[in-house]
Image (cartoon, coloured by chain):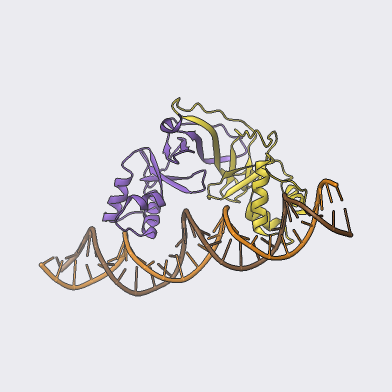
Chain colours: A purple, B yellow, C brown, D orange
Amino acid sequence: MGVQRRTKTVERILVAFRDPKEALSAKMLLCRMDEGVNKTTVYRLLDRLEDDGVVHSFSGDDSIKYYARCHSCSDTLHLHSHPHFQCVSCDKVRCLDFEVTLDAPENLQVMESQILLKGHCELCSN
Amino acid sequence: MGVQRRTKTVERILVAFRDPKEALSAKMLLCRMDEGVNKTTVYRLLDRLEDDGVVHSFSGDDSIKYYARCHSCSDTLHLHSHPHFQCVSCDKVRCLDFEVTLDAPENLQVMESQILLKGHCELCSN
DNA sequence: AATTTAATGCAACTAAGTTGCGTTTGATGT
DNA sequence: ACATCAAACGCAACTTAGTTGCATTAAATT
């Protein structure tokens, strides 16, 4: 049933996610919140915020779980059909703007699709 | 520079990958090879086979690395633009037949794309 | 058969993520 | 304002995927 109390740590995590496109791992979040927050708390809050439809998650190419803001999700409806991009140079991960629909074989009942593009971002592609 | 010697363990791993579409994790491989093979060996062989263009890898929704046979790759050219499917019920993972091309924003220099569909496979969708 | 070096096994390690439990703290009622 | 109670927290210990160093084994070549 997700987050019930608006604690300081919740506020700080939401601040870390102020960029609507940027995706963060638990470790990145821990680094940003310089004043000591426990990693267990971060992992648990990310779970709760995901339940609430505040953030969505996906697995990066490095097999690390990344989280980013949701924009039209709730605790009852989670819908993401946008791709994500991971820069192989600076390792930044983010949501891309366009939606993708794939027509999968009929015998498969597809519930979700995760698309991860890898390459060099604008800043790293020189 | 990949596999240089055709050892028994290499043979056994290639047998495990006889299904051209099925994707396997290191753990699954270890289970299949009932006679003791060390996990380090499996991880190392998978790396080498990937270098050689014999298998390709991708990250599952469970943040576990999966490997599957390549069909037209070599040590110099690795090219995969097909999606993968992971059944949320039986956890089997496999390659799908169709190729996908996405038009990413121009400012991004995309080198590779990973598409993972999640849902129920034919056998589990009742 | 002897030699060489890739491949293997083992133990110890790293890193992401989880769990149990005792303590703290935010929300609610009086 | 204060007591209460469960949500949220911190800590330590754990699980699991994957890696590394090193000594040993076994393919390939002579």
Q: Where on the picture, by quarter, is residue B54?
A: top right
Asked if B109 appears above or below B62 in the picture, the reply is: above
Label count reads 0
Of residues B25 and C1, the one drawn nearer to the viewer in this rendering: C1
Residue B32 visible (yes or no): yes
C20 with respect to C4 (left or right): left
A122 with respect to A107 (left or right): left
Image quadrant where one finds the N terminus of chain A: bottom left
Residue B126 visible (yes or no): no
B34 with respect to A110 (left or right): right
Asked if A83 appears above or below B66 in the picture, the reply is: above
Of residues B31 and B4, the one drawn nearer to the viewer in this rendering: B4
Residue B55, percent across and down? 67, 42
- At x 43%, y 27%, the residue is B107
Image quadrant where one finds the C terminus of chain A: top left
Q: Where on the picture, by quarter, is residue C9?
A: bottom right
Q: Where on the picture, by quarter, is residue A22?
A: top left
- At x 58%, y 50%, the residue is B89
Residue A77, percent across and down? 40, 43
- At x 40%, y 55%, the residue is A43
B33 with respect to C13 (left or right): right
